[in-house]
Amino acid sequence: ALEKVRKKMQVYQRENVDKIMMDHQKVRTVINHMGGMIAVVDGRDQFLFTNFKWKEFFSDDLSLSYSEYMKQYKIDISKEISSTNFYDNLKITRSSSHAVVEQKNGREFHFAFSKLSLAEQGSEQLSLVSLRSRSREVEIEKAQKQMMDVMIHELKNPLAIIIGYIELLKR
């Protein structure tokens, strides 16, 4: 009877491991096909996983730590906003900001940066890093500003002439 229970437990254990592996694979598949660039970083600052878009934009060399990666690719994170919540003994911190990535050719790319960190008993366990492209939005903002500058300049020229004539007429 004890042998039957042991065999049944092994079957259940194997099924549970298979189910966990399938769930893990589903999560990885979803992350791979998400809209932005996603990376998972462990508590030792090492990459556990990056999706396809991250690998396309950066490189496959994940031997660097997350911090070294940020320095090498000159990822400048400015005006970081952060919030922290606690759930039981788990500390959840969400940070977000605008990030600028400078590639080796000098071209800058703008991203919405967000990082979700989970810490247990004071030590960081896991972080999910996301970069969503804002380069097109930044280009549009620059084009709008240039257009406004041109319009203001073009309006000032005729106004200056009209104001000059008015001043002459006053005399």
Image (spheres, rainbow, N blue to C red):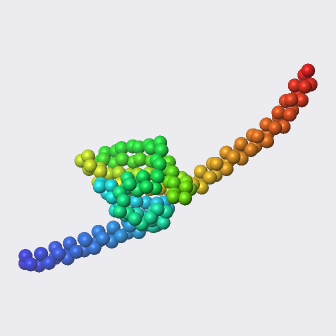
Image location (x, y in percent) of residue 51: 43, 65
Q: Residue furthest left?
A: 1
- Left or right of 97 in this view: 13: left
Rendered residue at 92%/25% (across/down): 169
Q: Residue at x 38, y 63 (%)?
A: 62
Residue 30 visible in rendering: no
The image position of residue 44, as x and y in percent, is 29, 55
Q: Is residue 168 visible?
A: yes
Determine the residue positioned at 33% across, 58% down. Answer: 46
* In this view, 13 is above or below 36: below
Nearer to the camera, 1 or 34: 34
In the image, farthest residue toward the top? 171
Give the side of residue 121 with respect to residue 64, left or right: left
41 sits left or right of 55 in the view: left
Q: Eyeballing the image, is 121 above or below 55?
A: above
**Which residue is at the front of the view, 6 or 93?**
93
Q: Position of residue 153 (x, y in %)?
A: 76, 40
Q: Quadrant of the C terminus?
A: top right
Q: Nearer the viewer, residue 77 or 38?
A: 77
For the N terminus, the quadrant is bottom left
Q: Nearer the viewer, residue 17 or 154?
A: 154
